[in-house]
Image: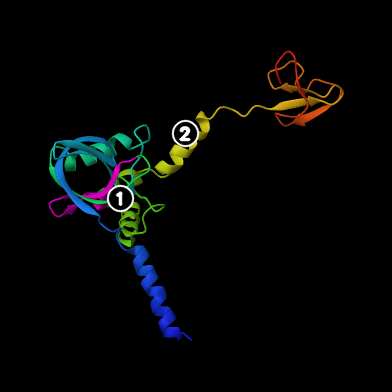
């Protein structure tokens, strides 16, 4: 039976593991030839452009407040410079995930420290990055000067929702068992009826149900 001390040691080890930086798979070296926004750059590696998404951070989108300034801050630190990309994996879009180093400077951490990006906690558990965000927020550096900054992942969710086409509603005439869609003149305009599913009843000969 495990002792209390051994269980405590396991819990401490697990917490430390979660707070540790992601494992580096390989190191790439090259020159930064493009900056898309505050968390994505293009690096020329062996004469081939590689799109790199900065590990552990999420910067404001281009159309958000501070989006342009975040991009400018990253550009100032990396554009035209030789960097080391500590590759940690790939994202779902096929981009290289990595930590960008300019000399001894960790650019990912610097973006958070200066208040130009969030710590992307959904995909990264590093305690040091969380602490840097807390310090930047407290000091109101960069985007934290905004009293109510909107996290970019929330902004993207709102954009997707607002762009989704509205769901079509249907009305079933209970007397004739005929289904009408919301653009039909008979939608919610029969003596007897109810809102129904898109396959209830038979389709209206005018609107197609």
Q: Is residue 84 above or below residue 131?
A: above
Q: Residue at x 33, y 41 (%)?
A: 94
Give the quarter of the image for residue 153: top left
Magenta part of the chain:
94-110
Position in image of residue 129 (x %, y %): 31, 57
The residue positioned farthest toward the top in the image shown:
206
Give the quarter of the image for residue 35: top left
- Label 1 sits on a secondary structure element that is strand
Instruction: Using a 10 Å C-alpha cutoff, classify the residue at mark 1 as few (fewer than 14 neighbours), some (14 to 19) or many (20 or more).
Output: some
Quick check: 190 left or right of 57?
right
The residue that mark 2 highlights is 159
Position in image of residue 17 (x %, y %): 35, 66
Which one is nearer the viewer's eye here, 154 or 166?
166
- Among the two numbered marks 1 and 2 on one chain, the one whose residue lies closer to the N terminus: 1
Q: Nearer the viewer, mark 1 or mark 2?
A: 1
Can residue 150 be seen from the camera position used here?
no
Q: Is residue 96 above or below residue 16?
A: above
Q: CA distance from mark 1 to mark 2?
A: 27 Å
Can residue 197 be seen from the camera position used here?
yes
Q: Is residue 126 above or below residue 111?
A: below
The residue that mark 1 highlights is 89
Which one is nearer the viewer's eye here, 89 or 125?
89
Position in image of residue 55 (x %, y %): 30, 50
Q: Residue at x 75, y 18 (%)?
A: 204
> What is the quadrant of the C terminus in the image?
top right
Q: How is the image coloured?
A: rainbow
Q: How many marks?
A: 2
Q: Residue at x 37, y 64 (%)?
A: 18
Q: Is residue 78 magenta?
A: no
- Label 2 sits on a secondary structure element that is helix
Q: Is residue 90 above or below residue 196?
A: below
Q: Is residue 98 magenta?
A: yes
């Amino acid at each position: 039976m495990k002792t209390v001390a051994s269980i405590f040691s396991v819990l401490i080890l697990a917490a430390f593991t979660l707070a540790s930086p992601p494992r580096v798979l390989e190191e790439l070296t090259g020159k930064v030839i493009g900056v898309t926004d505050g968390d994505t750059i293009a690096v020329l590696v062996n004469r081939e452009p590689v799109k790199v998404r900065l590990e552990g951070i999420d910067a404001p989108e281009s159309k958000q407040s501070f989006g342009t300034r975040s991009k400018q801050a990253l550009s100032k630190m990396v554009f035209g410079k030789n960097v080391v990309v500590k590759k940690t994996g790939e994202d779902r879009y096929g981009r290289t995930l990595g930590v960008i180093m300019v000399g001894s400077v960790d650019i990912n951490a610097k973006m958070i420290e200066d208040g130009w990006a969030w710590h992307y906690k959904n995909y990264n558990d590093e305690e040091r990055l969380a602490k840097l965000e807390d310090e930047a927020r407290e000091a109101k550096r960069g985007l934290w000067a905004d009293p109510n900054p909107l996290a970019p992942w929330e902004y993207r969710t709102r954009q997707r929702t607002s762009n989704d086409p509205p769901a079509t509603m249907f009305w079933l005439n209970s007397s004739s068992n005929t289904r009408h869609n919301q653009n039909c003149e008979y939608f919610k305009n029969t003596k007897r009826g109810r809102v129904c599913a898109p396959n209830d009843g038979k389709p209206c000969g005018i609107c197609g149900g």
